[in-house]
Image: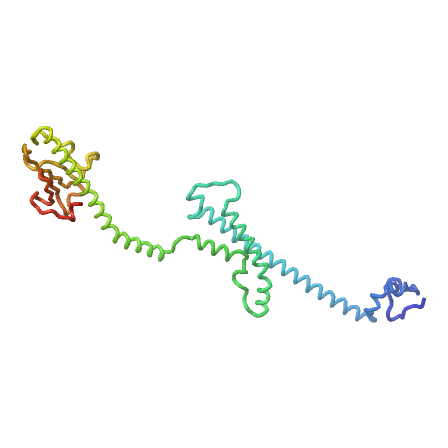
Amino acid sequence: MAARPPHRPCWWARTAPNTSSCPPPAACARYARTPAPTTLAARAGEKSSNDLEARHVQARHRNRRRSVRRQRSCANATARAYRTRRSTGPHSRRRWHGIHRIGRSADTRHAHRAGALGRARSRHGRGRDRARSHAGQPPRPDHVGGGASAMTRSARRRGGFSLIELMITVAILAIIVAIAWPTYTEQIRKSRRVEAQRALLELAHHLEREFSRSGSYANATLPFDRVPFDIPGPYYTIAFVGELQADSWTLVAQPVGVMRDDPCGSFYVTHTGRRAQGDAPSNPLDPECWSN
């Protein structure tokens, strides 16, 4: 077999220069496509360019690893601060409910999930940030620090009311109370009036039963004298007006206590069935005070 030209030696000739023969051409096919440098200066230049490219590659990998570590450390620090604030702050679950759990709480798991979400978003958004940096624009805020923005929004949502929101709520409550309170008190007064009128009619039936049995009202007594009769502070006291006659009577329910200033005043019922209110039994009936 003929020897290869000296300006394109095969790998066997470069390894053993004293050998005059080479392996078959198939073994040196991949070296035949790239001619070897002919001078030491060319070899040195090739080596220096390869070393420079290798250093650039190493620098890019090193900067990428540093960026990843920095983003992860920021996300972890934010998650730790969030967990500390949620576990010991004024709105924490432990402070309000006294829950001391062993192991990871729900807030801790939430912080871990938020940190993982932030890291995933930072990985997906790294290419966009690199493109923005090449274009001379700063990176997007939601890709800086991993899950910081997600946890900040969550903490802002759980932070409570602002002063303006609290003042608006208080103003709305004051308007509602100012409108509803008079109506509420009037309904309470009406219910107490109805209770007193019902007691007067019940006592009137009791007196009529006594008259049917004995033929006179003179010996009749009242089974109760206040409304309501089963609590210490009554709203009305019931009594006879004047002396009890054998053939006539008049009952009066006078407001006391919280009903002392009621505009309807006292309620009257006579043996003839006449009803009245105010300061005398001869007053005309007011439909606003008496219920049908």
Percent position of residue 119, x then y:
57, 56
Q: How many marks?
A: 0
* Residue 216 seen by the camera: yes
Scheme by which the image is coloured: rainbow
Residue found at the far right of this picture: 1
Q: Nearer the viewer, residue 61 or 268?
A: 268
Above/below status of 156 relative to 262: below
* Residue 36 seen by the camera: no
Percent position of residue 198, x then y:
18, 39
In-image side of 36 versus 230 (left or right): right
In-image side of 98 versus 223 (left or right): right
Which residue shows up at 50% across the image and 49% down it?
83
In-image side of 151 versus 267 (left or right): right
Which residue shows up at 73% across the image and 65% down it?
51
Percent position of residue 250, x then y:
8, 38
The C terminus is located in which quarter? top left
Which residue shows up at 41% across the image and 44% down it?
96
In-image side of 113 versus 252 (left or right): right
Which residue shows up at 31% across the image and 55% down it?
172
Q: Quadrant of residue 227?
A: top left
The N terminus is located in which quarter? bottom right
Q: Quadrant of residue 234?
A: top left
Percent position of residue 64, x then y:
63, 60
